[in-house]
Image (tube, rainbow, N blue to C red):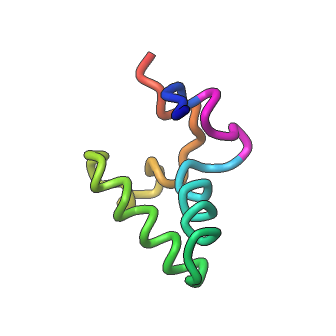
Amino acid sequence: MVFQDALTALSPYYSVGDQIAETYRRHTRCTRRAAAERAVELLGVVGIPSPGRGSTTIRTSSPAACGSG
């Protein structure tokens, strides 16, 4: 089952990018930097505009901050 609600699918204590990077690192053998770069790439693939640019980005945001409601 893939949960769609950001409040239940992701931990509110870690940023979105950190959680994606951690999952990527657990399934591949790569450095933290490479995993962080891949997280930004993956956010771009799913249509998040400029996921790694600016001081406040989706990569550094908490899951609750990403909700549309």
Question: Magenta residues?
Answer: 7-13
Q: Where residue 13 appears, x then y in whole percent?
A: 73, 43
Which is more toward the observer, 22 or 69?
A: 22
Is 9 contained in the magenta span? yes
Is 67 contained in the magenta span? no
Q: Where residue 11 appears, x then y in whole percent?
A: 69, 40
Query: Can you say whether 41 is above or below 13 in the image?
Result: below
Q: Looking at the image, which residue is at 39% across and 61% down? A: 52
Query: Can you say whether 29 is above or below 40 in the image?
Result: below
**Is residue 44 rendered to the left or right of residue 59?**
left
Which is more toward the observer, 43 or 23?
A: 23
- Direction front: furthest residue: 1
In which quadrant of the rendered image does the C terminus lie? top left
Q: Number of callouts in the render? A: 0
Please tell me in which quadrant of the rendered image residue 39 appears: bottom left
In which quadrant of the rendered image does the N terminus lie? top right
Q: Where residue 63 appears, x then y in whole percent?
A: 57, 37
Q: Looking at the image, which residue is at 52% across and 73% down? A: 35
Query: Can you say whether 5 is above or below 25 in the image?
Result: above
Q: Where residue 58 appears, x then y in whole percent?
A: 45, 47
Query: Can you say whether 32 is above or below 15 in the image?
Result: below
Please tell me in which quadrant of the rendered image residue 9 appears: top right
- Direction top: furthest residue: 69
Which is more toward the observer, 14 or 54?
A: 14
Q: Looking at the image, which residue is at 58% across and 83% down? A: 29
Q: Looking at the image, which residue is at 61% across and 27% down? A: 7
